[in-house]
Structure formats: structure tokens, C-alpha cells
Image: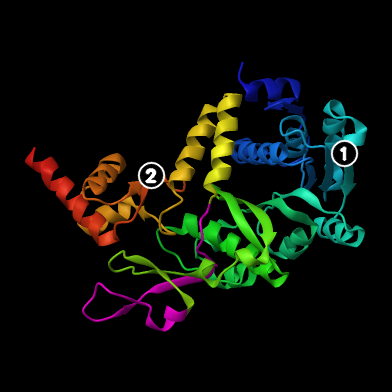
């Protein structure tokens, strides 16, 4: 009997070590991957630190809180949900599997909860905000509620803004002007990281991304709050894209006035998005620890995902889609693995990316990818 059928018959859902009822709460089963990654990160943190206290600011039915307690061994949780109509099922779920002394439930605005933490000088090892929309209004307060070297797990689901279809909204939410281009899934993560980093710097801190994950219309980032000397201006900048030829490049602050595509006899201005985070999306050591734990727990699919994420680390802050490569090559859309292998034969580094199944991250230029795709098509026809 499938899990979804069991839930429909009994009213109880199972995920990881948790069993729970949803009631009228919003629950997305497809978001389990993001929850699994959060649990792994929290468990790694708990292995390295004497305690794990969690603030789950937008808890819904409490599934994330339950899993942090049962699987990551969180010592204590502050569980908040703004909707009073689902507080009963939230309390029921927590009380069914956790001792009362292990959690504290509140009903109200997460902003008030975060401000209350400031007043009480209460700091958490992990602050989790699973927002619907943008978390921009809460970033400053999240930082103030996070312990130094603690973690923040933040979400945005505003894919239209992240993908550059509403630059005015991106300016309002992220302090950045986002434009549409083929690698906007990565852009969304970098917009969110850039906004967090800016708020952290204003408070004398910096952030270190531990992992960044995109799925569907959801952007999730896990960051560590660190001392301010970890920040440099090279971590913030712009992505320039040339729609006529497909070229992309990093544009730093001092190069904005010269942001033109180098592949045209008559200079064509690049379409600029930013400022956004230009540093790594992931931390290799932390991902390795997460992967080892996933292996120990038998989470083989998560282990594979983590390995793919780790391979993304040393590459430029954008990717090239197979569709765009094929369109500019005036050829069939190349097979991803064949393209990667051909690029590697020519001395380029190239890997797949979790951000887009039909894309590659590579040190090759877009023009070089197009040339390789044309060669592959020629060889295919010759055969």
C-alpha cells in the first residue's frame, strides 16, 4: 500500500521517523527532498556541537520540527505557526511523539517571535523559515535570532521574481534587479543569498553557504552565520548575458561601465542581473559530512544528489542549457552526457547540475559549447 493511499485511509502521514496529520495545514509531499537535506545538515551540526536548539518559524503541521527532533536529535524547539486554525493539529502531532518539555508552541506572526527573541537575547542553532513567497521582510530579524556559527534555512517560492520576469519586485525584495536569461534557476538562489549576505554585513557578520537547492518553484539555502571578516566585495556582483549569442559572464562592480559582449564586432550591451551572490553555492566539507550521513542512513538518492551538488562548486555562477546550445548551433539538442564527455576531451571541466536536468556547468564558454555540439551533430550524421 502506498504512503499516499495509507494517509488517505488513516489520516496519518509518515516521513522519515515522523508520523503526523495534516488537517487544514498546507503540506507539499514533493518538498521532502528539501526537508531531508535540512535534517541532514542539522544532524551534522549536532554532531559537531554540544546542543541543537531550533526555531521553526512557519511550522505548518510540524513535520520539520518533528524530524529535527527525532532524526537530527534537536534538544529543544520553538515551533510557531501564524494560522490559529491549525494549531490544534500542530500540538497534537508534536505531543504524540515528543515530550512536552522538548518544545514550545506559539501562534502568531513570525516577525513578532523573532523580535521577542531579540528582547530575550535568545539565540538558536538553527532558524528555519519555510516561506511562501519571499523571506526578505524577516531576514534582519532572522540574523539577530541566530547564534554565531549557527544555521539559517530559508526559502523563497517567488519564482517569477527570481527568474527575472518582474525586475521591480526583485529590486523590492532582494535589493537587486533580476533579468530573464536561461540560467535563472541558479539566479534565484544567488539573489536570496545576496540579500542575506547584505543584511549580515550591515550587522557586522557574514554568511557561509553550506548548500543551496532548487526544485520546481522553490529555492532553499542553508547558510552559516560567521564573523564579518569572511566577507569581501568579490562575493557580490552581477551576471551579464548576451541574448543574441548566448554568452554569459561575471561582471564585477568596477566593470559595470564596460559590460558588453566580447563576441561581436559592434559591442552589444550585456543584459545585467544583480547584485547577487557570486561565491560558492555549497561548502564541500559540510556536503561531504552530509553525504556520509546519508550513506549511513541508507538515503542513497540523497547521497547521489549531494554528490552532484558538490561537483557544482568550482564552476562559474551560471549554467548553459542544452536547448540554448542546440538553438545557437542550429543542430539537434545534444545529449547531456555526450556533451560533457566531449567538453572534457577538449580539456574543459564540465558536469551535470541539480539546478536543471537539461543543462551543464562548465569552464568552457558558450561559444565553445556550441562548437562542440556542432561537431557532435556532424559526427552523428557521418555515422
Q: Which mark is residue 103?
A: 1
- Give whichever of 23, 59 is nearer the camera: 59
| 199 in relation to 224, above or below | below
Expressed as whole percent of the image width and height from the top left, the position of residue 309 reads: 48, 44
Q: Which mark is residue 352?
A: 2
The quadrant of the picture occupied by the N terminus is: top right
| 287 in relation to 134, above or below | above
Q: Name the residue located 17 percent from the left edge and 52 percent from the top edge.
A: 374
Q: Name the residue located 24 percent from the left edge and 50 percent from the top edge.
A: 347
The stretch drawn in magenta includes residue 259:
yes
Residue that lies at the very extreme toward the left in this rendered image: 382
| 166 in relation to 336, above or below | below
Say which element carries label 2: loop
Say which element carries label 1: strand
- Give whichever of 78, 324 is nearer the camera: 78
- Give whichever of 220, 250 is nearer the camera: 250
Magenta range? 254-281
- Local crowd size for mark 1, using a 10 Å CA cut-off: few (<14), some (14–19), many (≥20): many
> Quarter of the image holding residue 176?
bottom right
Q: Which mark is residue 292?
A: none
**Is residue 219 among what the camera can see?**
no
- Local crowd size for mark 2, using a 10 Å CA cut-off: few (<14), some (14–19), many (≥20): many
Amino acid at each position: 500500500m502506498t504512503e499516499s493511499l495509507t494517509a488517505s485511509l488513516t489520516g496519518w502521514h509518515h516521513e522519515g521517523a515522523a508520523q503526523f496529520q495534516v488537517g487544514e495545514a498546507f503540506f507539499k509531499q514533493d518538498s521532502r527532498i528539501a526537508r531531508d537535506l535540512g535534517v541532514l545538515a542539522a544532524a551534522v551540526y549536532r554532531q559537531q556541537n554540544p546542543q541543537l536548539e531550533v526555531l521553526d518559524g512557519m511550522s505548518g503541521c510540524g513535520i520539520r520540527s518533528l524530524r529535527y527532533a527525532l532524526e537530527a536529535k534537536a534538544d529543544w524547539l520553538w515551533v510557531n505557526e501564524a494560522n490559529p486554525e491549525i494549531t490544534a493539529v500542530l500540538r497534537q502531532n508534536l505531543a504524540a511523539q515528543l515530550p512536552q518539555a522538548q518544545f514550545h508552541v506559539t501562534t502568531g506572526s513570525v516577525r513578532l517571535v523573532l523580535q521577542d527573541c531579540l528582547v530575550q537575547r535568545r539565540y538558536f542553532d538553527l532558524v528555519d523559515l519555510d516561506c511562501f513567497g519571499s523571506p526578505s521582510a524577516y531576514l534582519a530579524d532572522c540574523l539577530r535570532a541566530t547564534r554565531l556559527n549557527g544555521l539559517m534555512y530559508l526559502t523563497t517560492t517567488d519564482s517569477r521574481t527570481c527568474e527575472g520576469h518582474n525586475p521591480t519586485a526583485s529590486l523590492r525584495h532582494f535589493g537587486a534587479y533580476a533579468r530573464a536569461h536561461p540560467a535563472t534557476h541558479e539566479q534565484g538562489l544567488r539573489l536570496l543569498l545576496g540579500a542575506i549576505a547584505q543584511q549580515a554585513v550591515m550587522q557586522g557578520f557574514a554568511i557561509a553557504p553550506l548548500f543551496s537547492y532548487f526544485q520546481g518553484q522553490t529555492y532553499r539555502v542553508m547558510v552559516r552565520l560567521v564573523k564579518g571578516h569572511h566577507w569581501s566585495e568579490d562575493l557580490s556582483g552581477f551576471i551579464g548575458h548576451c541574448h543574441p549569442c548566448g554568452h554569459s559572464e561575471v561582471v564585477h562592480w568596477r566593470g559595470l561601465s564596460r559590460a558588453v559582449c566580447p563576441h561581436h564586432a559592434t559591442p552589444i550591451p550585456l543584459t545585467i542581473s544583480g547584485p547577487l551572490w557570486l561565491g560558492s553555492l555549497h561548502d564541500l566539507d559540510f556536503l561531504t559530512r552530509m553525504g556520509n550521513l546519508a550513506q549511513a542512513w541508507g538515503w542513497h538518492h540523497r547521497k547521489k544528489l549531494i554528490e552532484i551538488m558538490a561537483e557544482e562548486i568550482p564552476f562559474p555562477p551560471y549554467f548553459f542549457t542544452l536547448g540554448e546550445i542546440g538553438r545557437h548551433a542550429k543542430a539537434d539538442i545534444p545529449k547531456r552526457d555526450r556533451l560533457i564527455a566531449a567538453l572534457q576531451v577538449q580539456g574543459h571541466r564540465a558536469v551535470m547540475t541539480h539546478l536543471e536536468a537539461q543543462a551543464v556547468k562548465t569552464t568552457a564558454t558558450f561559444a565553445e559549447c556550441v562548437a562542440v555540439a556542432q561537431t557532435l551533430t556532424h559526427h552523428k550524421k557521418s555515422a
